[in-house]
Image (cartoon, grey):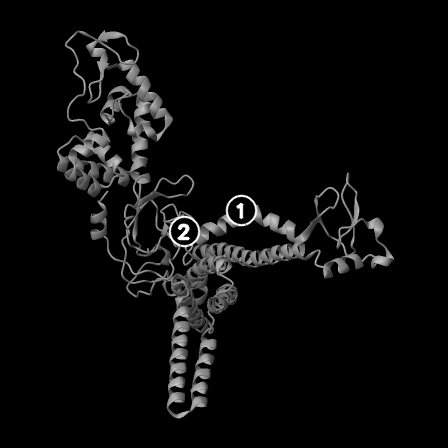
Amino acid sequence: MESDDDMVDDSVSMEDDFYSGDYSDYYDDPNDNDNDYCSDDDGDYGLLEDDDDDDQDALVSRRPQLGYTVLNEADIKQRQEDDISKVSTVLSISRFDATILLRHYNWSVSKVHDEWFADEEGVRQSVGLLERPVVQLSNARELTCGICFESLPRDYITSAACDHPFCRACWGGYISSTINDGPGCLSLRCPDPSCNAAVGQDMIDKLATCEEKEKYSRYLLRSYIEDNRKTKWCPALGCEFAVDFTVGSGNFDVSCLCSYSFCWNCTEEPHRPVDCNTVAKWILKNGAESENMNWILANSKPCPKCKRPIEKNQGCMHMTCTPPCKFEFCWLCLGGWAEHGERTGGFYACNRYEAAKQEGVYDEAERRREMAKNSLEKYTHYYERWASNQLSRQKALSDLNQMQTVQLEKLSDLQCTPESQLKFITEAWLQIVECRRVLKWTYAYGYYLPEDEHAKRQFFEYLQGEAEFGLERLHQCAEKELNKFLSGDGPSKEFDDFRSKLAGLTSVTKNYFENLVRALENGLSDVDSQAAAACSKTTSSKNTGATSKGRGGKGKGGSKTGGSSRNVDDTSN
């Protein structure tokens, strides 16, 4: 793998997309060897431009330019071997020692070079690469193993660079147990407790079984991805591809060749424009038990006798706890029902409760219940819309697949139009799929937007509403208005009008979502800048009014100007 500096120098700079296109389901054959993607300077925001020279029939075969590379196992092995060769050649050490060094410095070639040339002796000591043995073996025909303490011929004794003698059987058991324990075997040291000498792959190849050698090689290969900060495995179940991310690309949304898309930074599903911390909090909240407790607190009361939560599911206030408790009580005041009747207000009211409430007895309990109810209602509001857009996106993906595999050919025959001229329909569906993903995550963003930031919330809801309205119009046009052309008997004169309408709605919706994504990624900073400008005008106007009053007594004129500025301030907020 290239060094950090090399990767940055070699990478092509990429403008940040407002949102990334998820075209992973529509890539070419995953076995295609041409899987190296580089970044581009034109931010296409997930929508492919028309190209008259493009003779491909399917839009989906055109890949967006991205700031990452998808690696298969052969690519990983080749990069690993190249890095080992670089270090071995530059530092004039064996490939086995170069591997140990790279493992220690997380496979960063530049880091190895910097540390080695700055303090070679210190690096050797910390890594365990000894220049000379730490013990002197005698010239006797037999040597004593340091583990089993048996005296054996020299041919049965072997050692690492430190020359601590151990028999082959003990070495085999030591290596076998560490390899079977997991990837920790990659940091194997001499069995002598006082020795720091590293045990490299040369010893593994000499003393381990074939199965253990295979395990060790697999751990070493995975280490190249898992210990490197610029590479990660695709999180899809069963996928063996890895992603090498270009530092500084900005957009973390990536699509693997297995058709799975994810955020490279947090490995969750793509979620631009919402940041990874917000997504983590939202996913945790969706799966947490806290919402169950909020619901219980907001919609139930504890039985006064057994304390189990009771939900009121009928109109009257006469409650009966479930067996074996069977305690009868009043829902409002939680007093025994035997003490209630006509004199306390009957079945649908409770004078005792009203009197106690006026005295403040139930204030704290009611306040907590009201807070829980409001919190639950807010969460339900945002979650329902988040989930609804998720379902709509899945349906849109299904419709897009149906359009590409069946309906596009049928429409081409009915309207006597080449499929290459029907790409505007596919573009519309791709836009719908991407916009549904963006809209879904804006509801998670809205949930965590502070309640006291009224101007930001108002601006956010305006942008979200405009984007959602545009998306609904586009989705309805692509889903319903297209059907009459698919069910027709022949060419329709209205098809050209439909083409213009759908292409126009696609462009307008794209602009709406670009504005929404740009605003959210900037933290709705436009609101702050407008408020600051308005405040500046207000201060300037007040100063002008004070000066006028001091000079000619025209205080009213100054006050009027200041009042006008306050109106501007209120409007901008």
Q: What element carries label 1?
A: helix
The kind of residue tagged 1 is Gly
Q: Residue at x 39, y 41 (%)?
A: 239
What percent of the width, then of the height, locates residue 504? 42, 71
Of mark 2 and mark 1, the one earlier in the sequence is 2
Measured in 3D between alpha carbons, the distance from the residue under mark 2 to the one under mark 1, in whole angstroms, is: 28 Å
State whether residue 417 appears in this view: no
- Circle 1 is placed at which residue position? 287
Position of residue 520 measured from the top left corner of the image (x, y, whole percent): 42, 63
Name the image quarter holding residue 131: top left
> Dot 2, how many residues are within 10 Å of its Cα: few (below 14), some (14-19), or many (20+)?
some
Task: Find residue 350 and report its image quarter.
Answer: bottom right
Marks 2,1: beta carbons within 8 A: no
Given residues 77 and 222, the one toward you in this image is 222
Q: In which quarter of the image is residue 558?
A: bottom left
Residue 78 x %, y %? 24, 39
Q: Can residue 52 be seen from the camera position used here? A: yes
Residue found at the very far bottom of the displayed protein:
552
Mark 2: which secondary structure? Answer: helix
Q: Which residue is drawn at 47% across and 77% down?
A: 571
- The amino acid pointed to by label 2 is Asp
- 269 vs 23, nearest the viewer: 269
Residue that lies at the very extreme toward the right in this rendered image: 342
The label number, if any, that marks residue 478 in the structure image: none
Q: Is residue 188 above or below residue 427?
A: above
Residue 25 tag number: 2
Q: Quadrant of the N terminus?
A: top left
Q: Percent x, y for residue 91?
A: 14, 36
